[in-house]
Amino acid sequence: MPDEPPGPEIALLRPLGERLADSRRAEFGADEDVPAGVHSRIAEIVGHWKSLRPAPGLLPGRGHFDPLQVPQLLKNIWLVDVVKDDPRLFRARLVGTAFGQVGARLRAGKFFEDVAPEAEAKITAAPFRRVLATGRIDWRRGPSSLSHMEHVRELERVILPLAGDGAEVDMFLCLTVFYMSDGGAI
């Protein structure tokens, strides 16, 4: 009998950096297409975000985003503030109910460092730093970077920049789909 790939419980024993290296990841601009094969919720929020842009070359701001326009996505949406006068920098403003369903520790008002060990918080913050610097969309599908989320087989998330002035990123509109070990998606 040929060797079978290790089950999820064995895969979790690999170091986090090695597991994250297996992720599919893409950065893309507002005028570019989403990567092939993204979850329909990801494609929908990206399309909605693009429709909010006030003009070509400008990013939408928080004032352009009305959550009631995408009620079917609310449980997976989270908003993150850029808090420039705090060294922790990224604080959750709103966290959808899917996060509670999967046992995520992130809650509104919490910085990443408040809910994860320092090394995990740095890994979680890295794509936010890239989006802050570039204004480009960041998408990833792979294992969670947080150890308390090991029961989630993988997740798919997108980070969309928001800028009140159209240029300087001051917030992120994010959406995460959680793929559970039992094969379901939340």
Image (cartoon, helix red, strand yellow):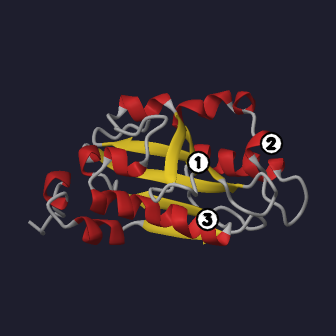
Residue at the (33%, 66%) spot, across then down: 20
Residue at the (17%, 66%) spot, across then down: 14
- As drawn, is 29 to the left or to the right of 105? right
The residue at which mark 3 appears reads as 132
- Dot 2: within a 10 Å radius of its alpha carbon, few (fewer than 14), some, or many (20 or more) residues? some
Which amino acid type is marked by label 3?
Answer: Leu
Distance CA(mark 2)–CA(mark 3)? 18 Å
Which badge, 2 or 1, comes first in the chain's sequence? 2
Q: 51 or 129: which is nearer to us?
A: 129
The residue at which mark 1 appears reads as 81
- The answer to whether residue 94 is visible is yes
Q: Is residue 45 above or below residue 6?
A: above
User: Marks 3 and 2: in contact by CB < 8 Å?
Assistant: no
Residue at the (49%, 34%) spot, across then down: 108
Q: How many dots with numbers?
A: 3
Which badge, 3 or 1, comes first in the chain's sequence? 1
Q: Secondary structure at mark 2?
A: helix
The picture places residue 169, in percent across and down from the top left corner, at: 68, 59
Which amino acid type is marked by label 2?
Answer: His
- The answer to whether residue 154 is visible is no
The circle drawn on residue 64 is 2
Q: 128 or 74: which is nearer to us?
A: 128
Distance CA(mark 2)–CA(mark 1)? 15 Å
The picture places residue 8, in percent across and down from the top left corner, at: 20, 53
